[in-house]
Amino acid sequence: MVSKISEGVEISVESYYQSDYSNPANNEYMFAYKITIENHNNFSVKLLRRQWKIFDSNGEYKDVEGEGVVGVQPVLQPTKQFQYVSGCNLRSELGRMCGTYEMENQNNKKVFEVKIPPFDLIAPLKMN
């Protein structure tokens, strides 16, 4: 697991290879990742948008952005957490993701950026 605190919000990430949804013979590798967002501020925050940078070891790059995460724009009170699971497909056994969340201070409505720490996507067969 990797974690990073920026702007008073902690982002922790765990990634998993999904062998049941992968087909290495066709260069299809599926990964899941679990994100935990924890608000260490003394004010509530709302997650407005996300932006992902997805790197594949074969040189492919994807930029993915949109509103909220998994269809919601959660509001986190101070000391509270929000957790979700999502996925990513690659064309090789190795990759990396990083990104940002755009969040809003619910007290003064100021928007700020929270960094998502880089994390690796590695198929276990590549570990040998």
Image (cartoon, grey):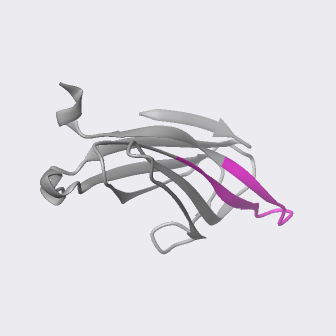
Q: Residue at x 70, y 60 (%)?
A: 103
Most foreground residue, 68 or 60: 60
Q: Residue 57 colored magenta?
A: no
Q: Position of residue 101 (x, y in %)?
A: 63, 56
Q: Magenta stretch mostly in which secondary structure?
A: strand
Magenta stretch in the rendered image? 98-114
Q: Residue 101 colored magenta?
A: yes
Q: Position of residue 34 (x, y in %)?
A: 39, 50
Most foreground residue, 114 or 105: 114
Q: Residue furthest top?
A: 128
Q: Residue furthest front?
A: 59
Work out which quarter of the rendered image holds the C terminus and state it.
top left
Residue 41 vertical placement versus 108 (above, below) = above
| Number of numbered callouts drawn | 0
Q: Residue at x 22, y 54 (%)?
A: 27
Q: Quadrant of residue 63?
A: bottom right
Q: Residue at x 69, y 40 (%)?
A: 6
